[in-house]
Structure formats: structure tokens, C-alpha cells
């Protein structure tokens, strides 16, 4: 009959249960806390709860700082009538007097789902738990500590009528007053906790094992200094290495480019070889230079078909093969075979794009190997890279990384999550500075022979500032993690590891002879740039392929637009004394520089700048088809705040 009655009640009263307001309050909470000799805080929290409505049971949420340890031990129900202690079963949250823990939240069941709702029901529960690393150590005086803890839980729905807190302090500690402290608070409204601030002095001879002690300031900042010193040492080693291969030798000024200098260092070599030697790579300028040279030599014929005005299209370069392919050099033959269909004698920009529209095409890749071999042969002693030793590339970075990991493991085993968090903080904080240093060193400093100062400063700033930032965040401890000396030492090793890798990536592998030639070629390029700024430059149209190899096609186009045609010829005639011809005048008796609009085989159908822009478009790669997709995602974040220790939330569910 009782079962039938309960079932009928459950069916008849759902609307009433849903409409009935649930209320919860605490007539009294007693907290008995004990601080042991090692600094652990043992808490017995006895909650007397008044429940109204369809509550399932109670809930206690604990706020625990990242640097603290927390252990929940047990929960029992105390019978309100007899005072008997009723054991509660862990993991049986579906049964009355069962409880379960989920992270920092403990729930217990007080009522079955089919029971009538509570009406002014009083329930008493006793919770036992323990904190470690709860005391805050004084950085200046290592025998001074503070217990700053909230013994209530502000995040709750109901009020606490009376809270009685008793704190017993072990004789290993001395307080400003008595050893056992007692507080009474009344009328704590929802949202209000009850925090205490107790100064403590360590009187025991040994340091407390359950208190996170900050590293001694001298030791902590010593590790920071070691990290900065490691970054500076890596930079110094980079500078010494590069100085040893003549990296910092001055570049000859443009005035030093005499006819003999120009012929020996530049014109005696194929233009694509000169371009690859100067900027240490084979790219579109080298391809354009090779094509221009073949046109100049008569191996190719060229014609520029200008795009209609206002269409925004590119000029089309038409090429005609005028020699047998077997007579070409190896890298020339590979490029011609790639640009011309088998047995074909003509091709164009549009033809090449149609040929490779489905698979893509990079003409620089086609000639890269052959040009690199010619650069090697152009140097008297070859172009053998300067290879770093295995000690530098493997042993040292592996040792530094292993030392960092070992220190962090030692710190994590002793300090747990806070030390692990400090290690992760060191890694994350170093990443943006490491990225700046790596990009500046590897992509802006290493390939250059001129303009080294700015990328060098960016590399040095990334490493040194990064080392300081990591040191301040880990040793300075702004987040209150109190990392151990081992963790701080690991951060210093990590900084040294990052600095070593970044400077190793910035180190040139080119021999001194190659670097010296590149500096002389840089002087030739500066000479070309200077002359192209003049209305009547002391240049020869025959040098056009070399100018393309130096990436000066836009400079030539700019000159032609400003000074080309009749104005250039008049300026050239007035600038050259008849009795003293220019030392750079073409030896074959040519008319000098006319912007490639009327000589040298580059006039095509458009003249002037047309060939330059058309051949540059021809030398560019044909992109391969690609597809991409994107998907949107949303994330949700939440934040919470509490006092320096303790607090949390509680109530029912």
C-alpha cells in the first residue's frame, strides 16, 4: 500500500512540485581547523542545513588555488534527533546517504526522487578535507608565513545564520596571540564568505614540508642572469663564427666598380650564375636573366604582344627557338624542354600556362641544380659549405633540452602542478620571442651580405628580451606559483636551448671566398642602381640580362618610363664628350644605353619596358590548383574569482 501511495503522489503532484520554490539555509556551520607542524590545514566542516522543496541533496564546491594541494577525506550524516553518525557510501549518488566527487565538487543525496519534497527539514553533515601548500611564505624572511583562507563558501544561495570557527595551531608555529583561535560570525548573506588572515612564525628547526617555499631571491635571479648570459654567449659565438669567414667585411663602394672589376666579377660569368651567387638562391630573376641572355645570343627570338589598354591583362611574351636543342647547355636545355612542347619551335606565356594549369610549374626549380653547379665551378676552390660540427648541431642542443626537461621533472615531482605550470609558462612565454629571433636570423640575417645590422639587432633583441621575460615570469613569480629552484633552473636551460638553436640557424654555411664574391657582386648591383637613377646612365644594353639577374627589372622599367626614347638619346649624346668616350661604352662600338628599346634584341613588338615586364611574368611560376575549406567553431569560456585561499560554493542540487 505504501508503494501505491507514493506512486500516486508522484503522479498527482508534479505541477505542485515544479511550482514549489526551493529554499536552503544554514542555521549553523561549525568549522574545526588544525594547522599541523608541516603546514597542512585539516578541516572538519559540520553543516546544519534547512531544506525546503524538492532538493535531491547537498553540494560543496571547493575553491583551490593552482599552487595548493587538496584532499577530500570523508563525509558522514549526523542524525538530528539522536546525534548518531551515519556512514555515507561513496559513489552511490542514486541512493540516500550516498555521495560522489567530481573534481573539486562533492555531492550527496538526502532525498529519493519519488519522495515528497522537504518542508523545513534539518540535516547535518560533517565533511573532512585537507589543504597542502596553503601557507604563503614571506619572500624576505623565510621564517614568516601567512594563513589567508576563507573558511566559508560565498558562492551559495542561502544565508548562514551562525558560523563558528576554531583554529588550532601546532607548537611548530607561533601566532601573535594564543595557540587556539576562535571566531563567531552571524548573518552571513549569500555571496559573503568568512576569511581570516593569521600571521605565523616558524619556530621549529626544520622547514615545513607541506608549504611551498619560494626559491631564495639570489638563487632565482641568478638563474635568470644565467639564462640571459646564455643568450649573449650564443650571440657572441655566432658573431665570432661569421667574423671568421669575413661576414662583416665592408662591401666595396660603387666607385670601386671599374671596367676591369665589372668584367672580372660580373660579366665574365653567365647572368643567371651571377644572380644565384649574389642572393644565394635561384628564383624568377635568374630565369628571366637566362631567357634574356638566350634572346641576346640569338638562340631565342622574342616578340611582345601588348595587352589591350584598359583590360588589366598581362603582356604576352612569344619565344621562338632558333637553334638545335642539342647545342644548349644542360640547364638551358632543361628550361627550353620545359617551356617548349616536344619538337615545338614556338611558345608563349599563354602556352606555358595552358601546359601546366593542372599540375603547376616553377621554372626556377628546373634550372636550380644546374645553376648551383655553375656557381660552384665559378669559385677557384669550389663552393663547399661550412658544416657545423656534430657537437654544435646535436650534442649541445640535446644536452640543453635534456637538462631543461630533467630540471622540470624534478620540480614537478616535488611541487606538482604549480611547478609544471611554471615550466609551461616558460615555454609559452618564450615562443613569440623565439619566433622573432628565428625568422630574423634564418630568413633575414643568414642570406644577406649587406644590411646585416637590422636583422642582427632583431635576432639579439628576440633572444635577450625573451630571456628576461621568461626569467621575470618564472623567477619573479607574478602568478604566485612559487616554482622550485629546479624549475627555475630548467627555464634557464630552456632559454639557452632556444638561443643556441636560433643562432645556429642564423649562422652562414658559405665559405669566405663565396661571401667575398657576393660582396663584390653587391657593389656591382649598387653601381647599376646608381646609374639607373641618372638620365644618361653609363651602362650598356648588353648588360641587361645581368641587371635582370640582380632583380633590377623594375628599376630599368622605371628608367625607361622617365628617360626613354628620344630624351634618353639626347641626354646620352650631351653627356659623353666625343674626345673621351665612357669607359663603360660597349666595346663593339654600340650606342650605349637606350633602355633596351631599340637594340640588344629586346625591342620585340613593344620596346622599352615591355620585354622586361613580359619576361618577368614568363619566368614566374604557374601555381598549381588548390582547394580550401573553412569551418566555423564557437567556444565558451567562464571565469571565477575567490579569495587567496579557500572559499568555493555550496548548497543543494
Image: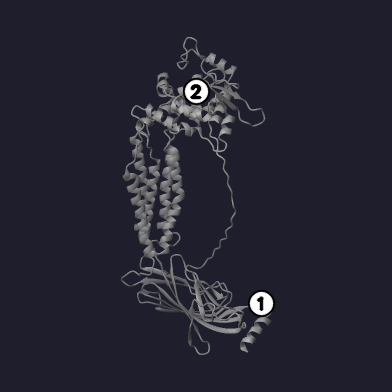
Is 207 on the left-hand or right-hand side of 590?
Answer: left
Question: Eyeballing the image, is 153 above or below 555?
Answer: below
Numbered label attached to residue 229 = none
Residue 460 visible in image: yes
Q: Secondary structure at mark 1?
A: helix
Query: How many residues crowd around disc 1 within 10 Å: few (fewer than 14), some, or many (20 or more)?
Result: few
Residue 529 visible in image: no
Front in this rendered view, residue 428 or 356: 356
Question: Eyeballing the image, is 335 above or below 466?
Answer: above
Front in this rendered view, residue 363 or 104: 363
Residue at horizontal 31%, vertical 70%?
Answer: 206
Q: Secondary structure at mark 2?
A: helix
Residue 304 in picture, x, y percent from top left: 59, 24
Query: How many residues crowd around disc 2 within 10 Å: few (fewer than 14), some, or many (20 or more)?
Result: many
* Location of mark 1 (residue): 18
Question: Eyeballing the image, is 475 above or below 96?
Answer: above
For the residues bearing labels 1 and 2, Cβ distance under 8 angstroms: no
Front in this rendered view, residue 202 or 414: 414
Disc number lying in front (1 or 2): 2
Quarter of the rendering occupied by the N terminus: bottom right
Residue 181 in picture, x, y percent from top left: 43, 78
Q: Closer to the N terminus: mark 1 or mark 2? A: 1
Q: Quadrant of residue 640?
A: bottom right
Residue 476 in picture, x, y percent from top left: 41, 57
Residue at horizontal 40%, vertical 73%?
Answer: 40
* Location of mark 2 (residue): 294
Amino acid at each position: 500500500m505504501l508503494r501505491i501511495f507514493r506512486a500516486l503522489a508522484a503522479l498527482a503532484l508534479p505541477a505542485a512540485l515544479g511550482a514549489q520554490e526551493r529554499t536552503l539555509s544554514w542555521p549553523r556551520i561549525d568549522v574545526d581547523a588544525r594547522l599541523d607542524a608541516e603546514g597542512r590545514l585539516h578541516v572538519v566542516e559540520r553543516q546544519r542545513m534547512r531544506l525546503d522543496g524538492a532538493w535531491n541533496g547537498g553540494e560543496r564546491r571547493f575553491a583551490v588555488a593552482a599552487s595548493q594541494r587538496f584532499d577530500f577525506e570523508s563525509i558522514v550524516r549526523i542524525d538530528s534527533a539522536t546525534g548518531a553518525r551515519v556512514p555515507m557510501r561513496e559513489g552511490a549518488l542514486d541512493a540516500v546517504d550516498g555521495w560522489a566527487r567530481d573534481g573539486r565538487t562533492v555531492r550527496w543525496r538526502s532525498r529519493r526522487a519519488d519522495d515528497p519534497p522537504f518542508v523545513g527539514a534539518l540535516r547535518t553533515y560533517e565533511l573532512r578535507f585537507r589543504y597542502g601548500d596553503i601557507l604563503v611564505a614571506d619572500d624576505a624572511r623565510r621564517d614568516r608565513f601567512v594563513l589567508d583562507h576563507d573558511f566559508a563558501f560565498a558562492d551559495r544561495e542561502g544565508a548562514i545564520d551562525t558560523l563558528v570557527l576554531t583554529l588550532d595551531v601546532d607548537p611548530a608555529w607561533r601566532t601573535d596571540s594564543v595557540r587556539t583561535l576562535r571566531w563567531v560570525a552571524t548573518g552571513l548573506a549569500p555571496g559573503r564568505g568568512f576569511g581570516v588572515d593569521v600571521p605565523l612564525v616558524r619556530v621549529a628547526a626544520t622547514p615545513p614540508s607541506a608549504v611551498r617555499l619560494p626559491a631564495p631571491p639570489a638563487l632565482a635571479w641568478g638563474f635568470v642572469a644565467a639564462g640571459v648570459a646564455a643568450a649573449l654567449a650564443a650571440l657572441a659565438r655566432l658573431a665570432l663564427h661569421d667574423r671568421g669567414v669575413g661576414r662583416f667585411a665592408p662591401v666595396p663602394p660603387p666607385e670601386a666598380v671599374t671596367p676591369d672589376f665589372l668584367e672580372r666579377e660580373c660579366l665574365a660569368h653567365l647572368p643567371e650564375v651571377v644572380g644565384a651567387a649574389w642572393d644565394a638562391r635561384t628564383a624568377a630573376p635568374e630565369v628571366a636573366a637566362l631567357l634574356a641572355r638566350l634572346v641576346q645570343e640569338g638562340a631565342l627570338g622574342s616578340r611582345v604582344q601588348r595587352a589591350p589598354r584598359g583590360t588589366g591583362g598581362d603582356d604576352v611574351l612569344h619565344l621562338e627557338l632558333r637553334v638545335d636543342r642539342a647545342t644548349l647547355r644542360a640547364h638551358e636545355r632543361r628550361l627550353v624542354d620545359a617551356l617548349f612542347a616536344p619538337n615545338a619551335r614556338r611558345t608563349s606565356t599563354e602556352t606555358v600556362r595552358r601546359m601546366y594549369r593542372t599540375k603547376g610549374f616553377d621554372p626556377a626549380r628546373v634550372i636550380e641544380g644546374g645553376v648551383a653547379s655553375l656557381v660552384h665551378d665559378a669559385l677557384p676552390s669550389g663552393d663547399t659549405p661550412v658544416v657545423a660540427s656534430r657537437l654544435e648541431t646535436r650534442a649541445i642542443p640535446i644536452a640543453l633540452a635534456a637538462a631543461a626537461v630533467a630540471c622540470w621533472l624534478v620540480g614537478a615531482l616535488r611541487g606538482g602542478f604549480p611547478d609544471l605550470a611554471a615550466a609551461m609558462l616558460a615555454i609559452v612565454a618564450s615562443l613569440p620571442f623565439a619566433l622573432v629571433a628565428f625568422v630574423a636570423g634564418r630568413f633575414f640575417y643568414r642570406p644577406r651580405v649587406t644590411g646585416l645590422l637590422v636583422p642582427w639587432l632583431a635576432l639579439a633583441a628576440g633572444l635577450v628580451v625573451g630571456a628576461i621575460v621568461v626569467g621575470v615570469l618564472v623567477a619573479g613569480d607574478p602568478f604566485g606559483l612559487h616554482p622550485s629552484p629546479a624549475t627555475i633552473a630548467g627555464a634557464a636551460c630552456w632559454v639557452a636551448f632556444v638561443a643556441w638553436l636560433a643562432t645556429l640557424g642564423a649562422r652562414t654555411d658559405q665559405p669566405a671566398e663565396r661571401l667575398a664574391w657576393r660582396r663584390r657582386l653587391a657593389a656591382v648591383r649598387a653601381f647599376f642602381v646608381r646609374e639607373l637613377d641618372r638620365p644618361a646612365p653609363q651602362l650598356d644594353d648588353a648588360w641587361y640580362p645581368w641587371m635582370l639577374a640582380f632583380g633590377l627589372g623594375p628599376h630599368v622599367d622605371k628608367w625607361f618610363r622617365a628617360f626613354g626614347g628620344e630624351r634618353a638619346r639626347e641626354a646620352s649624346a650631351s653627356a659623353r664628350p666625343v674626345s673621351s668616350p665612357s669607359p663603360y661604352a660597349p666595346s663593339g662600338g654600340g650606342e650605349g644605353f637606350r633602355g633596351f628599346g631599340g637594340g640588344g634584341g629586346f625591342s620585340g613588338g613593344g620596346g622599352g619596358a615591355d620585354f622586361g615586364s613580359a619576361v618577368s611574368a614568363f619566368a614566374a611560376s604557374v601555381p598549381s590548383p588548390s582547394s580550401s575549406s573553412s569551418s566555423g567553431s564557437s567556444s565558451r569560456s567562464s571565469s571565477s574569482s575567490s579569495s587567496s585561499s579557500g572559499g568555493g560554493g555550496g548548497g543543494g542540487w
